[in-house]
Image (tube, rainbow, N blue to C red):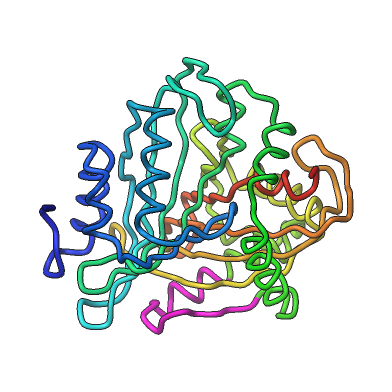
Amino acid sequence: MGAYGPDSDIVDFILGITFEIWEQRGVDLIHRYYAPDVEVYGMEGVIHGAQAMVDGTRQMLEAFPDRLLLGDNVVWSGSRESGFYSSHRITSPMTNLGPSAFGEATGRRVSITNVADCVVENGVVTREWLMRDNLALVRQLGFDATEAARALAARVGPEDRDWMAREMERVAEAELLSVTQETDAADTDGTRLATEFLATQWASADDPTRWDRYAPYAVLHRSPVERYSGREAINGHYADLGRAFGKPRVSLDHVACQPFGGGGLDIAARWTAAGSHADTFAGTDATGKPVFILGVSHWRTAAGRVVAEWTVFDQLAVLGQIVE
């Protein structure tokens, strides 16, 4: 039946339904907590309907039957009257004990970061954006990343390609960094800071004078197996990405913000980037092909500066766009 509903606290709701569906294996509760016509957006395309979500969840559990979804943070905006928007960051330790989309079972223990952004209306999820870095996953599993990327690209259908093309066109026609709020509930300070942080990452990643927006000791978590400690290391990482994608245009599509500690903030920003493959990425030399990225960044601030960041986008799907 499910223990959560329209009157539940939004953080309790998000953490609770995730636990019930995944860790208690109540997969059919997706029909209770998600709208029948829910749409889930990701780098592999759009999933239509709760039943498709049920099928995908069962497939994942067949490949990783001991998968846990450990909630690291839920950053949210909105209200019960207008609807909530939540950005749920998750660490998933799991063992590959069955065939997956990438190959036969390897028996390897892996860990990945996921972020699920959800629109919740009257106790039901009506839209979701799902970010997960499959490149980190296939590398931990020991599969060839290029071949896995080609296989992933082959699974993307015509409708999904059309959606990605429309998104690329939307972003490519905007300013170098544009702000497109899908709701009016985002905190003003959070939106301002998110814009500054994204500009530092993408619009001027190779300009060291802008990195004072990050504390000298800041840590960037790209995945459980890829971290960058210190302002200079983070700067170098984004400078490499900026060169790889030709300083892409970026649309800031949603911001949620909540207080943290004594004056700090937890900020969650969903964004879309459109660029071209202009330099080496994941071992593949420049091809000039267009690149579409759907990503999310979580920032924790103190004294107005980033002290920790989690940025997630599917690098394997990006590789698939340039090697297919």
Residues 128 and 247: in front is 128
Hey, which quadrant is residue 19 in on the image? Answer: top left
Q: Position of residue 262 (x, y in %)?
A: 28, 60
Q: Could you tell me which quadrant the C terminus lies in? A: top right
Q: Is residue 148 above or below residue 313?
A: above
Q: Where is residue 300 in the image (x, y as percent from the top left)?
A: 42, 56
The number of discs equals 0
Q: Which residue is drawn at 48% across and 17% down?
A: 108
Q: What residue span does the magenta drawing correspond to?
A: 178-195
Hey, which quadrant is residue 59 in on the image? Answer: top left
Whether residue 74 sits left or right of residue 110 in the image: it is: left
Residues 128 and 206: in front is 128
Residues 101 and 13: in front is 101
Q: Where is residue 111 in the image (x, y as percent from the top left)?
A: 45, 30
Q: Residue at x 56, y 37 (%)?
A: 227
Residue pushed farthest top? 107
Q: Which residue is drawn at 47% across and 79% down?
A: 182
Q: Where is residue 48 in the image (x, y as percent from the top left)?
A: 45, 61
* Residue 35 located within the stretch drawn in magenta: no
* Residue 192 located within the stretch drawn in magenta: yes
Whether residue 239 sits left or right of residue 80 in the image: it is: right
